[in-house]
Image: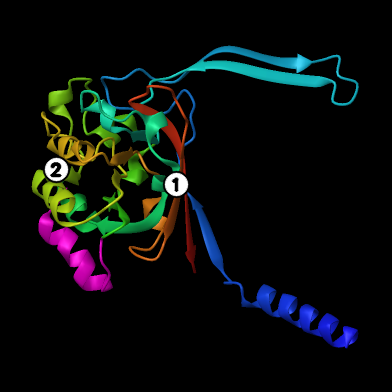
Amino acid sequence: MKMIFVFLFMFLIFHSINARPKNKELIDMTYVFDENTLRYPTFSGYKIEKLVKGPSENLITKWHQYEDFSTSTHAGTHMDAPAHFIKGGTTVDEIPAHSFFGKAAVIDITRKASLSPDAVATVEDVMNWESTTLRSLNETIVLLNSGWGQKWNDRDAFLGSPSNDTTKLHFPGFSAEACKWLTENRSIKGVGSDTASIDPGTSTSSPCHGYVLGRRLFILENVANMNKIPIAGAKLYIFPMKIGKGSAAPTRIVASFRN
């Protein structure tokens, strides 16, 4: 009898291992933080203020290294908390951890964005995602893929202007109507973009920020590798720095999906 139980136990272990999903992809959707990290012109950039590296008295490694750095919380791949636009709103450290995991819904506007840097994802684009995938946007993190990630290493191309004048920027985003529709008609977790803002570069009043953050949701900006995940079926794992009373935080984002 004992041998039978041992056999059954080993069979179940073997079966569970082989039943796990195969060919699962993990995509890092985060840009490296360094001196070349891009950000919206009104925010300060990343800077290493102190770098120590060299021999040490450690008996094992004979080496040590450490850095002090400074950066805007709104630089590089980052999360905006409601406090960014809402007086008294939730700060990034107050956002519950369960919000940081969810299904990705990628709204692809790469074709129209290739024709105009001022292209926007419309209500029709958002609704088409549901009709194409036969899925609901409820409980998803809605992401914009405009193809702008390919411009990341060219600051002027990414922002659409060599100037720091925010009235001269040109890059895609969501239309105000699309963000309003999403927040009023679907129970989403957040909104993100592969550009410097979920609002298009031409926007001067950032209505999408108002609609999304006003619903106590979060925003992800400068999301990398958007073209490497499917429009549906990926899960996002989002890890913002837990900055006390912060309106935003540098964020590591990883996507997981079956190949």
Q: Which residues are magenta?
A: 120-137
Q: Residue 14: percent from the left, percent from the top? A: 74, 78
Which residue is outermost to the front?
1
In the image, 39 versus 82, the foreground residue is 82
Residue on which the image places disc 1: 29
Residue on which the image places disc 2: 118
- The N terminus, quarter of image: bottom right
State how far apart marks 2 and 1 are (Cα): 23 Å
Where is 11 relative to 40, above or below?
below
In the image, 76 versus 92, the foreground residue is 92
Locate residue 172: give its quadrant.
top left
Q: Which numbered disc flags the more N-terminal residue, 2 or 1?
A: 1
Q: Residue 125: percent from the left, percent from the top? A: 16, 60
> In the rendered structure, are the residues bearing label 2 and label 1 in contact, judged by CB atoms less than 8 Å apart?
no
In the image, 229 versus 183, the foreground residue is 183
* Residue 125 in magenta stretch: yes
- Horizontally, residue 194 falls left or right of residue 97, namely left
> Counting other residues with Cα less than 10 Å from the Cα at mark 1, is it few (<14), some (14-19), or many (20 or more)?
many
Which residue is outermost to the left?
177
Where is 216 relative to 129, above or below?
above
Q: Secondary structure at mark 1?
A: loop
Q: Residue at x 35, y 17 (%)?
A: 44
